[in-house]
Image: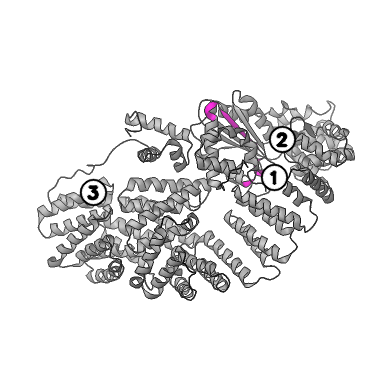
Amino acid sequence: MTGELILGRSRECEALDELVVAARGGESRVLVLRGEPGVGKTRLLEYVTARARGFRVALAASVQSEMELPYAGLHQLCAPMTDRLDRLPPGQHDAVGGALGLGSTHTPNGFLVALGVLGLLSEVARDQPLLCVVDDAQWMDRASMQTLAFAARRLHAESVALVFAVRTPVEDPSGGADLVGLPELRVEGLSERDARTLLRSVLPALWDERVIRRFVAESRGNPLALLELPRTAGSVELAGGFGLPSTQPLEERIERAYVRRVDGLPRRAREFLLAAAVEPTGDPALLRHATDRLGLDGDAAGEAEAAGLVKIGDRVRFFHPMVRSAVYWAASAEERRRTHRVLADITDPAADPDRRAWHAAHGAAGPDESVAAELERSAGRAQARGGVAATAALLARAVELTADPARRQDRALAAAHAAHEAGNAELALKLLSLAETGGLDDLRRGEVELARARIAFISDRGSEAPGLLLRAGARLAAHDAALARDAYLEVVNAAIFAGPRAHDEGQYQAAKAARLLPAPQPPRPADLLLDGLAVRILDGHTTAVPSLRRALRAFADPGLSPAEGLRWLWLICVTAVGLWDHETMSLLAARHLRLARDAGQATALPFALTMRCVVHVLDGELAEADSLAEEVQTVAEAVGTAAPIYGALFVAAWRGRETECVELSARADEGAELRGEGVGPVVSRWARALLYNGLGRHEEAAEAADMASREYSSQLEMGIPVWALAEYVEATARTGSAELAAEAFGRLAESTRASGTDWASGIESRSRALLSDDAEAEGHYRRALEALGRTRLRGEAARAHLVYGEWLSRSGRREDAREQLRTAHALFTSMDMQGFAHRAARELTTLGETVSENAGRARNDLTPKELQIVRLVREGLTNPDIGARLLLSPRTVEWHLRNVFGKLGATSRTQL
């Protein structure tokens, strides 16, 4: 049969041969085989395994019943590779070790596990080419599948081949979804000629031609159907092809054919097959122990094997996964429970407590507190291994087995939190509904409402979340003050994302509630931040500055816990922007990014990268900012989330790239439409205002800047809306709208004067100069240059030189103007701020200067990825560190560096 199933598969075999040849030559390849059950995917996997001579082969065969066990599939595939774990960076080493249950004391984050597996596959392939084969990938546990899909997308220049077989259609919508977008090959039924050839090879030679035609038609060329359906066909069906056509789906008919074959076996053989179906590891010794407990003799195994349904060697293997399914579901519920109980009894609780708990759960006929408690402990271990999806599934099963109402509510809440963390909002909401059954006290009701509010915020970041968070905080206030205050701080954060539509009412109500709920003593950094923000919202920016600075100092303290930092550093960075405190913003943004990288928090990392990207933009380091914006996209693509585009938008606006900036602005506006993320249009309009001021199109800049702040009915949100005022002042001053410019300047000065930093003073003086008469303007321009010159804000300093030079030019002081404009042009050109550089060049041209637009700009033909790698080499990072930063294997980094050395003529990292 092994040879027969290759019949008619020349296209598939050719694709697999190409994959093997490429991997043997040092090029990584991935292929996903998709097809219905029985179409021959497993046979093709056997084919590619046989063709991979000289390869190290790693195999994993997923079992539907193991989908709840975290990293079970990864353990199958990677456990034999653990001798290479020591080659991984410490964080990745511990993460992979923890996921594989090797005793690591660290709790692995799925992102670090994925990075570690990427590196592990690359390291194994250094010694010999590696072929990884995964059968029935639709049934692999989610943690393993996400990890392998991540690696499959990031492998490039290694001798690694990955082949996945996925059943279609997939009953579970998430099954195999992580593989979407990878190269795939649809495995279809055999042609009519090949189907007839295969069918005649197993049928008596004298069968009627009409029977042949009917089986070929009804099987649709499915090889397994062609082999199995004739075995169980009734006499009428075989009597010249006169049986009635079946209305059952083909998969169901094949499974029923297996059920009929199983039903025809002696009882002891059926019980043996059920034990083999229940025991997913295929361990012959464990199966033998189970059958002994069931009172089965050696003949039972022989009869099952003789029927051609199972093969017993170093592993117990069913002829086809559908046989396992048919055996399991053909048995009665009590027969299945009894067999699971036996497997639970014989599974070593010390060596494999999770599988023991899993068997015990499936063996329970009703509520059972001891089993529920065991599942709860298993969920804790799953969480420690980074399997949040498995944690949710195990806790959800524990809920079903819990009789005590209070414990049931606690477990349902814990399961909902795990499901939310795993990104399964639907399951989380279902579990929250379970927690609500039977009535809740106020504390639990508040916890449920807070969980629902957090799900709403993560789902769309829209205007609904602030109100939900506010109600949850109000309910929690009398029972858990710290949790209630956290909820109020989350209201402020959510309102920033929701934008003007939710800003005023949501933040105002949260601030009033926070003022009535005193902070614990000593206050946490988050309490200081909430109190400071409440003062700002209720009493104004000027009054709030001292308390907000206390919060900044608390978060800048080296003793800040990583958990608190990861949770609130984004918001405190926004606060630093609101205080015009660039130094603290830079410090905290760097800490946030470091914590997110160290923790491997894929959800926090894009936001930490974006904030750090903004710092680089303000410092005039657009190349570094661009690199981080690329990394945001890379991380988001790797974990399947929407990428924040604000960092890329900042870079495009400052560079003066109109097409790119407008396109990104449109995407930010779409976020408001799709997710209710009202901050998107605010940022996009500010970016367009900056872009058009740089291009000298001040009327368009004024319109965009006005739209960025006009919808805030009371005081402006910190950051972008205030920055938009500075753009509006410049744009309206240039278009002659002095009254509008003066009004905007008044609102801007309220923020800058209270903060009093060099950044604030520089922006205020530059803006005031644009509105002043000739007698006063020069003093303000010089004060702006002095203040901004004491900062690292090179872009803003260059703009001060530019507007000062333009004023000098209009005042007839041509030589002084040239000096300021040359400085501005040189700075803008060195920072690749092309829009502003062109504006300075145009002004210089009117003064008779000949300007080289490319002066100071380096030219090379490096790709964006190569440029990223060169910048990281300059930071002193090793290849593994660069790989972790860019989500590449170290081997791929080496490959890119070889290309870089060739293009630049460099021979060492020092030369780069």
Left or right for 853, reference 647: left
Q: Where in the figure is residue 752, as x and y percent of width and height?
A: 29, 66
Residue farthest toward the top in the current orientation of the protein: 54
Residue located beneath label 2 in the image: 221
Residue farthest toward the front in the current orientation of the protein: 522
The stretch of residues the image draws in magenta is: 125-142
Q: Is residue 470 magenta?
A: no
Q: Where in the figure is residue 796, as x and y percent of width and height?
A: 26, 56
Work out whether residue 807 can be spotted.
Answer: yes
Under mark 2, the amino acid is Gly
The quarter in which the N terminus is drawn is: top right
Left or right for 269, reference 314: right
Look at 48% across and 70% down and name the residue there.
Answer: 519
- Image disc number at residue 827: 3
Q: How is the image coloured?
A: one colour
Classify 617 as above or below 485. Answer: above
Q: Where in the figure is residue 121, as x and y percent of width and height?
A: 55, 34
Q: Is residue 130 magenta?
A: yes
- From mark 3 to mark 1, how far is it between C-alphas? 60 Å
Foreground tag (2 vs 3): 3
- Pick the front one: 104 or 429: 104
Q: Where in the figure is residue 630, as x and y percent of width and height?
A: 41, 46
What secondary structure is marked by label 1?
A: helix
- Work out whether mark 1 precedes mark 2 in sequence or the reverse, and give the earlier one: 1
- From mark 2 to mark 3, how far is it between C-alphas? 69 Å
- From mark 1 to mark 2, how far is it between C-alphas? 31 Å
Residue located beneath label 1 in the image: 66
What secondary structure is marked by label 2?
A: loop
Look at 67% across and 60% down and name the residue there.
Answer: 411
Foreground tag (1 vs 2): 1
Under mark 3, the amino acid is Leu
Look at 59% across and 30% down and name the residue there.
Answer: 131
